[in-house]
Image (cartoon, grey):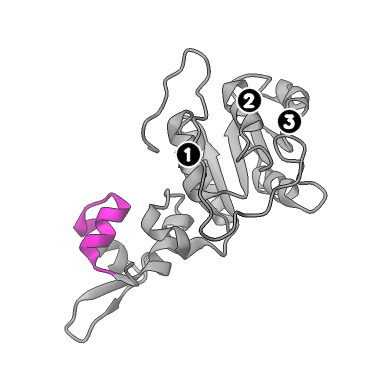
């Protein structure tokens, strides 16, 4: 495990070009220091903080750099709505990962172990995404916040969401809903139960489940 990354390694993890990373460092957007030989190095915690602040999915290499932060997994198809939700939560201090419905969401949930799910509901009952979360034995007690049509708020609560937010979320609405979902006494979870304690160190993990896309939708095979 690297404590420090070169600009080349950081560019690979960020999914951008080397000149882009250098420009971010020069603009003081990304924190870095120089070695005695004059080479730039980026601390893994600083790289993780940068990615969280900008709503970028954290790679596995940086997962433990964000363990102390509250973690939210945003499940939705790629686009402005998903990116906007990730940015809002990151600005509120959450470590955020994003995934498309389908296998990618199940894999991301198993790896990222979020404290809360945020889904963009495709239907008044939450669709297959919500049903899959509610019935998954590993994920079923993690609270779910749904963003959906204003007419769907009551049905989404009845379907098992801890909190619901009308789309598009007003300023502060999503962050407030996530905080309430995680608050003691308000953490209903997908199946109405408390979140179970984390598995003991070294305990085997269940295989990632597939959090399905809506009927007729595609199953994502990547987290993009």
Residue 45 location in percent, x, y?
Answer: 43, 68
Residue under label 1, please give it: 207
- Sequence-earlier tag: 3 or 1: 3
Residue drawn at point x = 21 percent, y = 61 percent = 8
Q: Are marks 3 and 2 in contact (CB under 8 Å)?
A: no
Viewer-nearest residue: 215 or 103: 103
Viewer-proximal residue among 134 and 124? 134
- Name the residue beneath numbered marker 2: 131
In this view of the protein, can residue 161 be seen by the observer? yes
136 lies left or right of 163? left
| Magenta-drawn stretch contains 168 | no
Magenta span contains residue 18 = yes
**Could you tell me which secondary element the residue under label 2 belongs to?**
helix
Q: How packed is label 3: few (under 14 Cα within 10 Å), some, or many (20 or more)?
A: many
Quadrant position of the C terminus in the picture: top left
Q: Taking 80 as reference, is 213 above or below it?
A: above
Q: Magenta region: which residues?
A: 5-20
Label 3 or label 1, whichever lies nearer to me, is 1
Tell me if mark 1 has few (under 14), some (14-19) or many (20+) residues whose alpha carbon lies within 10 angstroms of its own: few
**Residue named by callout 3:** 160
- Image side of residue 28 versus residue 197, left or right: left
Foreground mark, 2 or 1, reads 1
Seen at 26% across and 51% down, the residue is: 16
Viewer can see residue 167: no
Residue 199: quarter of image: bottom right
The location of residue 114, given as percent across then percent down, is 57, 48
Q: Earlier in the sequence, mark 2 or mark 1?
A: 2
Point out residue 187 in the picture as x, y percentages from the top left corner: 75, 46
The answer to whether 131 is drawn above or below residue 204 in the figure is above
């Amino acid at each position: 495990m690297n404590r420090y990354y070169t600009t080349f390694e950081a560019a690979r993890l960020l999914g951008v070009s080397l000149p882009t990373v250098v420009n971010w460092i020069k603009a003081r957007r990304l924190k870095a220091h120089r070695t005695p030989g004059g080479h730039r190095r980026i601390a893994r915690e600083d790289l993780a903080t940068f990615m969280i602040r900008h709503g970028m999915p954290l790679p596995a290499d940086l997962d433990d750099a964000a363990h102390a932060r509250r973690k939210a997994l945003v499940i939705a198809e790629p686009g402005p709505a998903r990116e906007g939700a990730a940015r809002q939560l990151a600005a509120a201090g959450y470590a955020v990962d994003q995934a498309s419905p389908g296998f990618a969401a199940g894999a991301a949930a198993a790896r990222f172990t979020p404290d809360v799910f945020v889904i963009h509901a495709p239907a008044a009952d939450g669709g297959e995404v919500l049903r899959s979360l509610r019935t998954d034995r590993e994920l079923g007690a993690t609270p779910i916040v749904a963003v959906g049509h204003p007419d769907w708020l009551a049905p989404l609560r009845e379907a098992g969401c801890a909190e619901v937010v009308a789309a598009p979320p007003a300023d502060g609405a999503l962050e407030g809903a996530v905080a309430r979902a995680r608050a003691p006494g308000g953490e209903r979870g997908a199946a109405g139960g408390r979140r179970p304690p984390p598995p003991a160190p070294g305990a085997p993990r269940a295989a990632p489940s597939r959090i399905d896309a809506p009927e007729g939708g595609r199953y994502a095979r990547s987290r993009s």
